[in-house]
Image (tube, rainbow, N blue to C red):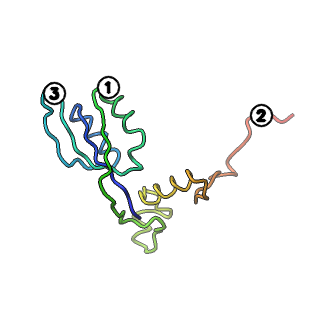
Amino acid sequence: MPLTGYTKVVRGPKGKLYAAFGKRQGRVVAAENALGFGGQFRVLATLPVPESFQLARELRTQTSGLASPQLVFSHWEVIEQDPYWVPSTEEEYLHYGEKADSGNRAKKYMDAVRRRKGLPVDSQLVTHGEKQRTLSKNK
């Protein structure tokens, strides 16, 4: 599954920038002191495009408005995960469970695109229909 990447140049507090990129599967390529800005760092990082949505808002809230991202398209990259993978061996069942829903990035990105385009997605609307009940009293 191809994946696009953005290169981000951000100035702000180093620890909070690293936390924001790590949370969104980003890789920090380079970091240096920003000249003229006390305690500020200039961070160059690559980040998947689906993870870059709402990044500017998150950076501003975490850094109290000190960080400002600059987005530039960088490259295409292939995700090595299979979005349709299910456990097949006994060892995989023991390790991942029956559904293996521990977080497949390729499946997550594919489902997000399908939802945005209005295509069908492999997710159940009601997971446990027999457990649902109405809270109103029957008279």
Q: Residues within 10 Å of mark 1 (few under 14, many from 20)?
A: few
Q: Amino acid at mark 2?
A: Ser
x 83%, y 36%: residue = 138
In the picture, measured across the screen, residue 47 lies left or right of residue 53, that is left
Residue in the foreground of this view, choosing between 20 and 31:
31
**Disc number for residue 136:** 2
Q: Amino acid at mark 3?
A: Gly
State yes or no: discs 3 and 2 in contact (Cβ < 8 Å).
no
Q: CA distance from mark 3 to mark 2?
A: 58 Å
Nearer the observer, disc 1 or disc 2? 1
Mark 1, secondary structure of its residue: loop
Q: Residue furthest toward the front?
A: 72
User: Which quadrant holds residue 53?
Assistant: top left
Check disc 1 and report the residue beneath it: 65
Q: Residues within 10 Å of mark 3 (few under 14, many from 20)?
A: few
Q: Residue furthest toward the bottom?
A: 89
Q: Residue furthest toward the right?
A: 139
Query: Which quarter of the image is occupied by the C terminus?
Result: top right
Residue 65 horizontal/vertical position (percent): 32, 26
For marks 1 and 2 on the same chain, the one whose residue lies earlier in the sequence: 1
x 60%, y 57%: residue = 119
x 51%, y 54%: residue = 113
For marks 3 and 2 on the same chain, the one whose residue lies earlier in the sequence: 3
Query: Which quarter of the image is occupied by the N terminus?
Result: bottom left
Check disc 3 and report the residue beneath it: 39
Q: Amino acid at mark 1?
A: Gly
Residue 130 horizontal/vertical position (percent): 70, 51
**Disc number for residue 51:** none
Residue 133 horizontal/vertical position (percent): 72, 43
